[in-house]
Image (cartoon, grey):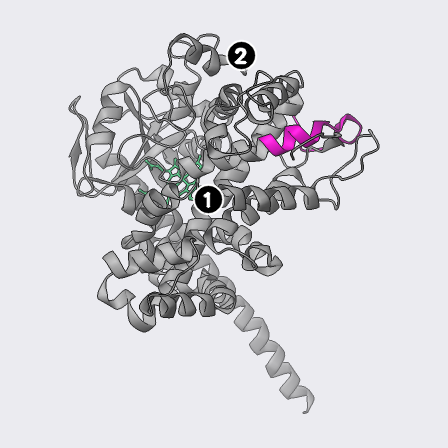
Amino acid sequence: MDNSHYAHLQNFIAESEWNWYKIGLGTFVAYCGFKYLQFVKRRGELSHIPTLGSSSLIPSYFTAYKFFREGRNLISAGVQQFPGGVFKVPTFDGWQVIVHGRGMLEDLKRANEEDLSVLEAFVDLIKSDYTMSPTILRDPYHVDVVRTPLTRNIGARFDDVCDELAIAFNENLPSQEDGEWHSPPGDLDSLAMVQNIVVRASNRLLVGLPLCRNEDWCKLNVQFTIDVMRDSILIGMFPRFLHPIVGPLISTWKAKMRRAMGHLGEIVKERIRMTEAGEERPNDGVTWLVDMNNQIGKEWQKGSHAVEDIVGRILSINFAAIHTTSTAFTHALYHLAAHPEVQPLLREEVDRVLFTSKEDGGDGLGWTKAGMVQLRVMDSFLKESQRFMNISAIAMTRLAVRPYTFSNGVVIPPGTSVGYAAHAVHQDPEVYSQAQEFIPTRFSDMRAGEESIKHQTVTPTPEWLIFGVGKHACPGRFFAVNEIKSMLVYLVRNWDVRFDEGKNAGKDGIEWEGGYPKSREFMGNVVPNTDVKLLFRKRKVSGSL
Ligand code: HEM
């Protein structure tokens, strides 16, 4: 090639760079213009609803940023500022309408799917048409599996789940019995350590042995939620009409499904064969899904499609189960470290209720489902931990499918996302006396007076919203609470826990709020601080466990 060819080539590259630059700039300007028009249109449609912060474009981005980073405080401020029960907050993606007060909660509870849709809210939140199989959430029979056979079998499968979590605890927490404090093996943060335990225990119930111990299966399920959330945020950055194009390009669902099919496909196939042959089958999530698919699945989900459909639904139950439960347990661990006086309290209750026989003055219930119900101080501690650190500041997010009129006359147009200010209720001094104080026995003290189940963690009420309330309240809450309490039983029996002051001192990323490591937030969702380090001291346990 002579020099003139090189010159041409260089010119071409230089020009094409310039062209790319122009195309990039043009796309950016078009995108900003589109976002602006969309912003103005939605602002007009929602103009009758007061705005938290400014309604102008640029300042609203500051509020959107604040909502992204400090949603809990921002919403609580909105509840104070707008006693009328409704306000709107700008987000990077549009507007979020927040409602509060008993009347608005009743409206959300009563609204039917054709008005305020929970399904469309989930689909929109996680862009599930692209990040999962579009059919999983749109035809959610796995929710019925969680609500009925899974919940009914908590007792029958309790020993297996406890067996798995004990083994997983022993692998993930220090085992030295030298009376000294130790860091957990490896350099995992507390949330990752807890996820390792929760994914094992949950999958012992869902897919059984040996798959629940397969490292790649566990990694896949822990990572799945993170990837879905990341992909949905990326897809959400594009205008809606581009989602069908960018969605499949961004989403990693197909690769995840291939991996999941490699682990679970043959198991599901064999389970379908056993079902058709009328053979005895393992009592687990796969069997329950096969049965529900036969019972209420659509025609196209059956036959050769059934295997993929069921594998996808196992991923999706894991999606709902692992991060929620792990987040709640990690907060409980931090609260135990922040309030060390609670540890002997829980241990005394566990010893008395579960491991001391009736003849010796205890209840002798053993490590059983019946025993978990009687651990009232533990239940109270867990509920108090969640009262401060519930996974989201907003409960019962719904998407308006057609214009909806609340009982106070406020109308929201179709396409509006609306949610309830749950954290503000949990921190309201008129609802909870000394609301800013962490009182571990708050709820067990309330129960002492009245033999009521209404103060239990598992019972949703208008004042207790971590699981939502009404017909869509989390169907997995009975399993979740049993699992977390079983984990706490094993933990307090076997280890003392405290913060590693040496490693935490002056470390970037840890801000302390009243002795508690400040959580991370995104859009009102609360994630435990993963920079903070814990130490554990193995206890010598006599008798069971
Ligand atoms: C501490 C742990 C958990 C928390 C805080 C939690 C919280 C929630 C919340 C707030 C909702 C939405 C309710 C609404 O919009 O009204 C929900 C829905 C759901 N949860 Fe949970 N959850 C937890 C554990 C679990 C577990 C362990 C499972 C499965 C075994 C599960 C399965 C589901 C399912 C399938 C839905 C969708 C319900 C529907 O579409 O109607 N969750 N959860």
Front disc: 1 or 2: 1
Residue at (33, 66) in percent of width and height: 278
Q: What's under tag 1, amino acid-wise?
A: Ala
Residue 452 coordinates in the image, percent (x, y): 36, 16
Q: How many discs appear?
A: 2
Name which residue type carries label 2: Glu
- State whether residue 161 appears in this view: yes
Badge 1: residue crowd in 10 Å (few <14, some 14–19, many ≥20): some
Q: Tag 1, which secondary structure?
A: helix
Establish whether ligand 1 lies closer than 8 Å to the Cβ of label 1. yes
Could you say whether the residue bearing mark 2 is in a helix, strand or loop? loop
214 sits to left or right of 85: right
| Residue 245 x %, y % | 37, 64
Q: Examine the structure image and report whether residue 507 is included in the region drawn in magenta.
A: yes
The magenta region covers 489-513
Q: Residue at x 64, y 28 (%)?
A: 492
Please indicate whether residue 225 sits to the left or right of residue 424 in the image: right
Mark number, residue 437: 2
In magenta segment, residue 188: no
Q: CA distance from mark 1 to mark 2?
A: 29 Å
Q: Position of residue 119 (x, y in %)?
A: 28, 46
Instruction: Using the image as rendered, state which of residue 458 and residue 330 is in the foreground.
Output: 458
Residue drawn at (16%, 38%) of the image: 403
Whether residue 5 sits left or right of residue 502 in the image: it is left
Q: Which quadrant of the picture is home to ligand 1? A: top left
Q: Is residue 526 above or below residue 513?
A: below
Can residue 124 be seen? no
Quadrant position of the C terminus in the picture: top right
Left or right: 240 with respect to 497?
left
x%, y% of residue 264? 48, 64
